[in-house]
Amino acid sequence: MAPSALLPDPEPEYIIVHAGKGTIKREILKGDKKKPTFETITQVDFSKMNSSSLEDRKAIAKEIGAAFRDSGFLYAANHGIDEKLQDDLLAVIKEFFDLPFEKKMKIHVNKSDTIKGYEALLETKLDACTRGDLKEAFATGDDPNDPEQNPPATLNRSLYPSNGNQWPASPPTFRKTMYAYQAAILSFSKSLMQLIALSLSLPETYFDHMSSFPMGGLRALHYPPQDVSTDVGIGAHADYSWFTLVNQLSATPALEVLNHNGAWVSAPPVKGTLVVNVGDFLEMATRGRYVSTVHRVVNMTGMERYSLAWFFSPSAECVVETVPGCEVEGEEGVRVVAGEWQRERLLRARYKHPSSVAARARGEL
Ligand SMILES: O=C(O)CCC(=O)C(=O)O
Ligand SMILES: [Fe+2]
């Protein structure tokens, strides 16, 4: 037998991801090919985020910057969102998903031009190699027709259709509880955006003008346990947002993050924390200094899993450009209208939705 040194290298294996920004093919690095990369997700303490001392705020910003450059993920501890509110959320979200299928289908996403409402099991397929995403979802988002959102008088309402958000009649406290959470998470998001500005050595208020009526999506998710590892709760993808905040409402570990060796790193629920991950807007604006990392959900625990994801993006009419200090020499900077870019991504990911079919027929996609 030939000495092992003379054996040919094994055929490389790849992970293929349809992240929306294009297909990513990443080799799974083994043995000597492995490079240093993250194996766990860092925790950052936000208790001093509103400290009157700029030095305190800068210290948090520094940790955020390090995590966003390394893995693009972190756990935010002491974020200040009321624990009781999170218990209430889990209760109403469970109750909603327990409703009979026909009731949930009354507010199906196909009835909303902005793809808000209920989405059934296996309806989306983020990883083309699977039979679909083994999850059901309920989505709401920025919509000036909902009085709770208190839109500014200057908002260009023509950007919003009349059939945006759809709310279920039951459970009766569902809408109120989701909006209480949205108010809290929106306030945390604006503070986090200021810390991100600091982390990039920009004035703290640098991004403030981009949050007058931010595109924000709140998505409740239910992942039943899967029987086979070839299924996925959500296929590998990256998010289209400045950042995403995932509240892992149930203690069911299933979220996984792809590291630079092509290995999946577990991001299990850590009580009292939110998972924060960089989205594509932030990756674009920082020209890749902060990484919008691929992740997925695989629920092999035998237990139900509930989570609540919040996607925080710029206001629709804003132009996202390379931030000062992140320019790449010899390359043109980024310049996209946030609302147009995000809508195109959303429609591409939901290619069967009537809005997507219509946009393709108009030659827009
Ligand atoms: O449920 C989770 O933990 C993550 C959800 C997610 O990645 C998404 O909805 O984009
Ligand atoms: Fe995601």
Image: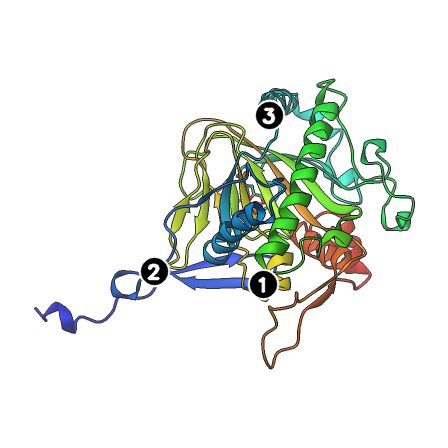
Say whether disc 3 or disc 2 marks the residue closer to the N-terminus.
Answer: 2
Of residues 140 and 246, the one nearer the viewer is: 246
- Say which residue label 2 marks: 36
Badge 2: residue crowd in 10 Å (few <14, some 14–19, many ≥20): few
Report the amino acid beneath label 2.
Answer: Pro
Q: Is residue 294 above or below residue 179?
A: below
Report the amino acid beneath label 3.
Answer: Gln
Report the amino acid beneath label 1.
Answer: Gly
For label 3, the SS is: helix
Say whether disc 1 or disc 2 marks the residue closer to the N-terminus.
Answer: 1
Q: Position of residue 192 (x, y in %)?
A: 62, 46
Of residues 69 and 59, the one nearer the viewer is: 59
Q: Position of residue 3 (x, y in %)?
A: 9, 70
Badge 3: residue crowd in 10 Å (few <14, some 14–19, many ≥20): some
User: Do we see residue 90 in this rendering?
Assistant: yes
On screen, residue 299 versus residue 120, left or right, reads: left
